[in-house]
Amino acid sequence: MRFEWPLVSIDEIKSQIAIGPFGSRMKSDCYVSKGIKVVRGTNLTNGRGLSGEFVFITPEKAVELGSSNLAPGDLVFPHRGSIGEVGIIPDDGNKYVLSSSLMKLTCHQEKADPNFIFYFFKSSIGRHELLKNASQVGTPGIGQPLTSLKSIKLKLPSLAEQKTIAEILKALDDRIAALRETNLSLESIAQTLFKSWFIDFDPVRAKAEAREPEGMDAETAALFPDDFEESCLDTIPKGWKFTSLGEVSSYINRGISPKYTENVGITVINQKCIRDNIVDLTKARKHDSVQRKVEGRELLVGDVLINSTGVGTLGRVAQILSIDEPLIVDSHVTVVRAGESLTWNYLGLALSNRQAEIEQLGEGSTGQTELSRAKLAKLKFIIPMYEILQAFDLYTLSLRNKFSANLKKIETLATLRDSLLPRLISGQLDVSEKK
C-alpha cells in the first residue's frame, strides 16, 4: 500500500442494519409451497451463492415483515446457529426475506462496495470479528447482534479500489459457480439415465410393447428383457433380482475416532465434508496414523460415503470419484464398497437416489439419531444383469469423470481465491494502479 487505509466501523458505512423477525412473527405455519424465499443459515455457502432447500412465505406476509425484506447486494449474517458465516443476496429476479435467526447489512453505496464488504467478512479477519462476541453455551449466538455488527471495524480503501479487489475475487467465484452449474447438469444427465433404466424400466417397457428403446444402440437394447415378473417384493424386469445392500457390497463399515493433528497426517473426511452429493476436502482434518493405525481403512475410488449420525446430516451421500492422497473417514461416516456383482458407478447413483429413504433408517432420540451398519445392510436393491451395468458405465462414466475433473478445478480456484483474499483485503497486494 502507498498509504494506510482508514479504519472505519460498519456503523459508518451502513445504509440500513436490521434483524430478522421475532419467532412469533415467522412461525412454521407461515410457510407456503411457493412465494418469497426465506433465507436461513442453511442456505449460506462457501462461495457467493445461496443453496439448499428454501421455505417460502406469501408476498402479503413479506410486506408485513417490513425491514426483514432483502434487496440484491444485501449482506446476511446468522446471529444464532451458524454464526461466522455471511451471504450476499443475488440479483436473480427472486425476492428474499430474512429468517428469524439472521440479520442484514445494506451498505451505503457511496461509501462501501457490498462485494468488498462481503469478502472482508469471508476473510479470517472478518470471521473473527463476527465470532468475537459470540457465546458457545447451548445454541451458538451473538448477544446484542446489531450492536456487535455495527461496532466491527475494518480498513477501507477508496471505493474504486474496493470495486477492483471485489472484481478480482468475484471473477474467481463466478468461475467456480459456472463449474458447479456444469456439474449439476452432468449429474442430472447421469441421474436421469439411471432413473430411466433402473427405476422406471423404460427400455424393458418399450420392448414389452414391441417398441425400440429410445436413446440406445441395438446392441445395448438387446441386453434388456422384454417382460416383467413378480418377485418377493414387487414386479421387476425378468431375470433381474431383489437383494440387499449387504449382499452386494464387499465392505460396509464406520470409520475411526481420529487422533487429530495440525496439518500433518492422513486426511479424515467427516460429516461436514459430505454435502450436495460431493466430498469437500476443505472441511477435512488430519489424523496422526502413528498414534492409531489406519491400515485397511483407506478409501478406494468408487467408495460411497454415508453420514450416519445427527439430525439434518444423517443420510447424506457422496462418492469418491478420484483420490490424490490417502483418505479415511471418521466414526460418523459409513463407507460402502461395491462387490463383484455391482459396478461402483451403479452403487453410487443408486444410493444417492435413496438419501431420504436412508435417513428414515436412523434410530434414536432427537439430536442423537444414528444409522446402524446392520440396518443399512438390509436396504433392498434391484440388481440387473452385470452386462447392463457395464453398458450403463459406457454411457455415464465419461460424465462422472468430467464431474470429478471439474471438482479438482473448483478446488484449485478456491485455493487461489482463499490465498489472495487476505492479501487483497488487508492491502498487501496493491491494486491502486490496476486499470
Image (cartoon, rainbow, N blue to C red):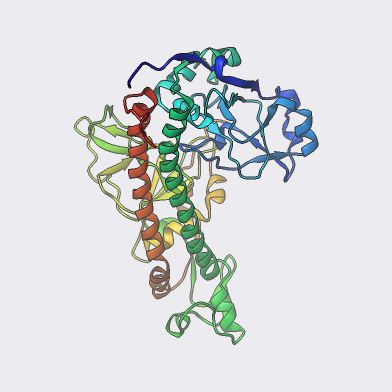
Residue 164 pos. (x, y %) = 43, 34
At x 57% / y 25%, what residue is drawn? 110
Name, please, the residue furthest toward the bottom: 210
Q: Is residue 413 left or right of residue 117?
A: left
Viewer-side residue, 155 vs 299: 155
Left or right: residue 246 versus residue 21 is left
What percent of the width, then of the height, locates residue 141?
Answer: 55, 18
Would you place residue 249 above or below residue 258 in this image? below
Residue lying furthest left: 290
Q: Quadrant of residue 293?
A: top left
Judge whether residue 85 can be spotted in this image.
no
Q: Quadrant of the C terminus?
A: top left
Front residue of 251/105: it is: 105
Q: Position of residue 294 (x, y in %)?
A: 24, 40
Q: Give the side of residue 405 with respect to residue 171, left or right.
A: left
Instruction: Please say whether residue 22 is visible from this viewpoint.
Output: yes
Measured along the vertical axis of the image, is residue 203 above or below residue 419?
Answer: below
* Residue shown at 53% from the left, 25% from the top: 112
Q: Where the N terminus falls, by quadrant?
A: top left
Q: Position of residue 344 (x, y in %)?
A: 37, 60
Q: Is residue 55 above or below residue 202?
A: above
